[in-house]
Image: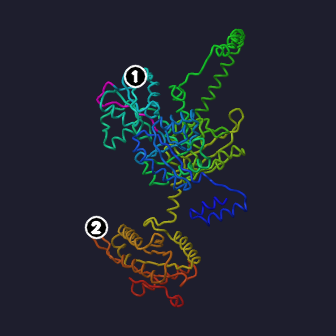
Amino acid sequence: MQLFLSFVENNCMISFARKLLTLLCTTGLLWISSASAQTVEIGVLAFRPKPEMLKQWQPLGKALKRAIPQHEFNIKVYHYPELEQAVIDKRVDFVLTNPAHFVLLSRRLGVSAPLATLIVDDNGVPLSSFGGVIFALAERADLQKLTDLKGKRLVTPDLGSFGGYQAQAYELALAGVRLPGDAAVQVVGMPHDNVVNAVLHGGVDAGFVRTGMLEALAHEGKLRLSQVRILNQQHVAGFPLLLSTRLYPEWTFAALPHVDENISRRVAAALFQLEDDAATTRAIGIHGFTTPSDYSHVEELQRELRLPPFDSTPKFTLHDVWTRYYWQSVSAASASLVILLLAISLFMTNRRLHTQSNKLKNEVRFRHGLLDALGEGVYGVNHRGHCVFINPAALRMLGFDETDIIGKDQHALFHHHRQDGSTYQRFDCPIQLSMLDGKTRSGEDWFWRKDGSGFPVAFTVAPNLIEAGSEGAVVVFHDITERKHNDERIRHLAQHDTLTDLPNRALLKDRLQQAMSYAKRDKQHVALMFVDLDRFKPINDTMGHIVGDWLLKETANRMRSCVRESDTVARVGGDEFVVLLRTVENEEDALMVAEKIRNVLNKPFELAQQSLQISCSIGLALYPEHANNETELLDYADIAMYQAKQLGRDKVQVFLPECNKQR
């Protein structure tokens, strides 16, 4: 213990050591968290030159440090073998790599399930998927389709590169071109720039790179897109990059098994919040991270191509053959006898089954026709919330294909967030509640289309027994966007003057009540002005209502320019306006605004080379100096306005209590 004190004293930490010893004596517990000083290593796969990749991803380490200050975060960039060796040696704690490489690391080296999926940024468009590009020189007119690549020389950065080899190899396999047997494949190593250089300088027929690579080199001035031809070009809605293959989930961010669960959870939370840090995402060139995607399609591709980690052939011995087919052989003879007996039985019942089948087909056809003809959206879910059927009207409103929805969780697809962007918790979902308590529910909610836009719906959900008696639900909904717009328009018209679009008397009264309530609570002042136009009636009578209406609208615009956004200019009569100053310091401030209005209305109004001249009389009353409630304040401002007219017009008159007594 004294050795420990000596060490602490030599490092100028005597007071801290004494406090620590006191704590140890009272509790008998010593806890030193090595994790607090731990440096977290993040390995990033390099598909571009290492210096560029390191420069790109350095801001991520700084952002994680800001979010989790107890740790240092060090970004390191590796090629494929280097990253795998770093994982084996436990020299990295987290990895950011392509989906195929993640599957390999997960199967062979025990990398944990993904924490997040990368969302890249392509000129402001967030992309959470990517694919591969197959390209050749533009002058190669002999290379038009995938089958033209048979017997040709192809170049790839690495056979382990998902976007630079595996996605393309899968598309070629589907077209009947098996690699490497049907074409010569040359590996030039990372980065992908090497592939582009090899194609541009000749010696090979076509190259493989991941999506976005050609555009990036074109942006850097290293390539003109007119120099290359894209084979098997795909056009996917919402995906702006050149593409030759199917789309797959973007890169995954995963933790190694030795990493503390608390650190993993905090890193995942920081990644999800990264899109709010515009400076960091802009520096990296990404949009952020999202919840882990489904990488099962990537695994299916690797199994089909027999790529690592699924490149080994399973062992199968003669004993396995005997064990596997013994009962099949024995059963074959028995089955033949059974089939004969069944054939007789089936022949006897064939007509009955045929009749029932036709009846069932007609019923199914009728139900499908009924669903297809409905203008409202209808879909059904099973007890897990997965969609089991959906009609065309629902697909049109949601913007999905049937294959996008059937078998998928409806809540996660188009019911995941509320209108304000907050997460819609599953336990609040009316569909889930109806399946739990068996009650029918109706109301209004918010659905999201495939393109990310949302719209309001009116819905009815009813529980339904489906799938062998398990509890599900049927949902009927329709888009009420137009109705909402109409309601908003009606509400606006009810509260605003149709000519000037200024608040009317009803809305003015409501705002005045609020202003006086806040003023009473905060001990502030409210000012109210009655503004009556002088010499307006002669203009309106002699030049017509069209000119008069134009003059009223211009008057409204000038008065609005004299007040703050928090203040209100309302039209309460033909040429009568009311100005509500929500808060003022004193009477002088209110008079200053009134004079500003009077002066701006004194300026000529130019119309069709004619100059129209009016003025105004303004009456001013203040709360609490003159009135105790909104009715008195309106009356006293009106009285002051009439007094201004009596004094010769074109004046601002503050309410005088003795005028009210004379009245």
Looking at the image, is 354 positioned above or below residue 262? above
Q: Residue 298, percent across and down?
A: 52, 33
Looking at the image, is 115 positioned above or below residue 159? below
Amino acid type, residue under disc 1 in the picture: Ala
Q: Give residue 114's mark.
A: none
Q: Nearer the viewer, residue 27 or 286?
A: 27
Mark 2 or mark 1, earlier in chain: 1
The Cα atoms of the two marked residues, 2 and 1, are separated by 79 Å
Q: Residue 614, percent across and down?
A: 35, 77
Looking at the image, is 40 positioned above or below residue 314? below
Q: Give residue 183's mark.
A: 1
Which portion, as a residue range, is magenta?
130-142
Q: Residue furthest left?
A: 609
Q: Residue 426, percent across and down?
A: 64, 47
Reading the image, the residue beneath label 2 is: 608
Looking at the image, is 529 positioned above or below residue 348? below
